[in-house]
Image (tube, rainbow, N blue to C red):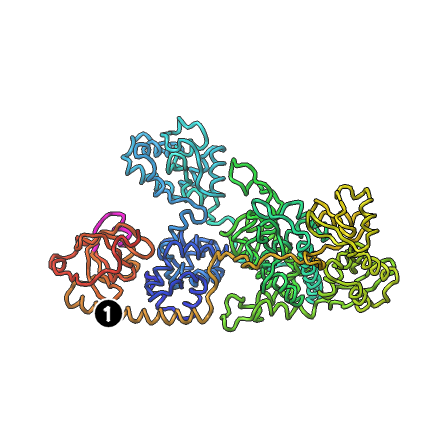
Amino acid sequence: MTDLADWLRRRPDDDLSALLRERPDLLHPAPSDMSVLASRANSRASAELAIDRLDLASIQVLEALALSPEPTTVADLAALLGVKPDRLDASMNRLRSTALVFGPDDELHVAHVVRELLPFPANLGPPARFALTEVSPTQLPTMLADVRALLGENVDAGPLPPVEALDALAQIFEDREQLARLLDAVPAKPREVVDLLAEGTPVGRTAGARRPVDAKSADSPVRWLLAHGLLVAVDDYTVVLPREVSLLARGDRVFPDLILELPPFEAPRYPPSDVDAVAAGEAFTTVRLVESFLERWGIDPPGVLRAGGVGVRELRRTARELEIDERRAALLIEVAHAAGLVAPDDTGESWLPTAGPTGYDAWLAQPTATRWALLARAWLNTTRVPALVGRRPEPHETATGSRPAPAPNALGPEVDRALAPIVRRALLDLLRQVEPGGAPSRDDLVAALRFWSPRRGGWLRDDLAISTHEEAELLGVTGRGALSSFGRALLCPDGDESDPVDRVDPVDRVDPVDAAAQVLEPLLPQPLDHVLLQADLTAIAPGPLETELARELSLLADVESTGGATVYRFSAASIRRALDAGRSAAELQELLARRSKTPVPQPLSYLVDDVARRHGRIRVGATGCYVRCDDESVLAEALADRRLDSLRLSRLAPSVLVSPLGAERVVERLREVGYAPAAEVAGGGLLLRRPDSRRAPARFRPIRQRVELAVPSPTLVSSAIRVIRAGDKASAAMRAKFANTSAAGGSMPRTTATQSLAALREALATRRPLWIGYLNAQGQASTRIIEPLRLAGGQVIAFDHQRSEMRTFAIHRITGVAWADEVPDEIADDMPDDAPDDLPGDALG
């Protein structure tokens, strides 16, 4: 069995389902039959994506298979790796499920594209016989003489012809005893080079690699190795260590550190109730901090930098006001932006909370648990990496010789990483697989990610894993390092721990926000509807307040301290802020009396009445601006007050003063010297202004970059399998029909898909014409004499000798091939040519 399509046809539907779930790219578009599916699975792009998704154990087994002859057996593979065959079961099942390997245990085949994608499997170079073909023929006899001299053999017989010298050298390298003697005779310095390349990559760089050299003229360890064939130059700057030399230097081990399974986590375990309590506290704090800084940004928004983002000063100010460090402030800002709660205003000059049905105000109206779930989902899916804010790139993150880049800003363009959502979900999935309350260490999680995704990310993956571990704790997704119950609900809302949300049919899928909020709701502290007023003009909130009360109190008083309880302080300025927002003295007195568990202190009541009595006695409008007051003595006092000389006031009427300055400046200065003016609109009414009322227009939320296809749902997979099976039956019937025609007329070649593709590749390399049988999209058959010129995307562009033009043929529609110079003349003279092709030859550009 050598044909992948035939092997797939014999697989049960469960195996095909596993293949399509492991490699969802094979479904776009749905394959028409099994030959098309096998052709796509053998394509370079799809196979490379499948290899990138493998774990370390599967990749090591696949590389060992790439080193083995075709076909091989599981027993031989286990012997090559030095393990028992049953230890390879898990990796072999994974490789078969991805169709990178197919066949039974006694006849294993590797997809041909795998050998192309793994040019140096297990970091081993090419076999010596193949590598030595790169050596100049004139140098091969000299190299053979130097090698025999090093082995102590007689070299007086004279030089051999290049072909015989190459064969003799290859035999020495393929004989383990002779190669061992050769390595034992290598001096210390060259041996260090051999060991270095054997432990790492077999490829090295050196200048003048192909310059002729012999043992006497070698002036460096590398040149000495080149003279003796222990290194082979493949171009002017590149040398490679032959495979046999690497294996012997490693002690005949294909992998110095073979890892076939990840050891279980040795993690401390906490009671799940304690984990949920800690995580719920952080979740509640996250929601309150986001609400707090967005309320402040609504009053005093930070500017948008020219390059985008928030300036360092504004980030520090926000961190200082929230009483947190800058790292956590950057995290909250980025998560709020990812959730669509903050955006630039119309002018693009300021960052503001957003309006609209998906904006900040709508978010604020949701229960606290739902608000947290929306933030957590945004963090899980965003490509933004808050940990990069303020961190200068490390040397390995910048190009060699380039100038160090400045530290990225929050909300700036430099903190986007497409790998971020993949690493976040992968790390949380690892935590999800641990029993509830289990808290693996950060180092164990990073090591596990390296095992499960060895080819993806490198240092970036490790950095993202570390930052994810920290951010999940700060946001409340985890507590004490263990995944919380509502964090599990966010990842698996349907409650099936073995089947993540991406694998559930859309019609049956539970909204992860609703699922997480439902679990979190009973764990959150219940918000209070009251405060405790003190005689020293303060109010104490002994716990979290209801959203409406918190907003009213932040308008009426200033936060003095936070912690287990929040202390608010009342002042003339804070009360005037509430009056400016349209509140009356009676409304403020009623609010305080209704929301306080203690009687309203007399000093606070007097303060409210006194500020309200003075508030608005002076009205300020725009001329430059005017100042009016019914009490002429107040205006006379202001006019005589030297502290107001900067306003350049002049009397326009007994009750009206004017100033060339703007109304905002006049109001501000009058308040600074002790007056209590109120701004006025053109019609004479009070200008009501809530300091937190500024909003940015509704905008689309930041779009998550789709860096890979989602796992298809079971419904989609089962439908695709039915289509493939039906198409395969139709294709088989058509092939049988034309096979009978061929048997009767002797004019239709028949080969397997693998044989056809191998012949096409050989014809492409040798420019040898082929005779093909072809079925077009309408099922019509014809035979052609073609000369392949290019293979791309499952199609072959070839010169059609019968039509004398370039045409394009779909490889999966080729029923068979034969060499054109081997076709009998009586068949070639009677080839049917009445069926059109699918595409003209220039369709692929």
Residue 342 lies in the magenta-colored region: no
Could you tell whether 121 is left or right of 129 in the image?
A: right
Relative to 665, residue 532 above or below: below
| Residue placed most toward the observer, 288 or 488 | 288
The image position of residue 759, as x and y in percent, is: 26, 54
| Residue placed most toward the observer, 639 or 532 | 639
- Magenta span: chief secondary structure: helix
State the extent of the magenta-drawn residues as a range: 759-770
Inspect this view and state whether residue 422 appears: yes
Q: Residue at x 47, y 40 (%)?
A: 197
Q: Name the residue at the bottom extreme.
A: 508
Q: Name the residue at the front extreme.
A: 653
Q: Amino acid at mark 1?
A: Ala
Q: Residues within 10 Å of mark 1 (few under 14, many from 20)?
A: few
Q: What residue would you read off at disc 1?
A: 736
The image position of residue 154, as x and y in percent, is: 34, 32
| Residue placed most toward the observer, 526 or 202 | 526
| Residue placed most toward the observer, 319 or 811 | 319
Relative to 434, residue 447 above or below: above
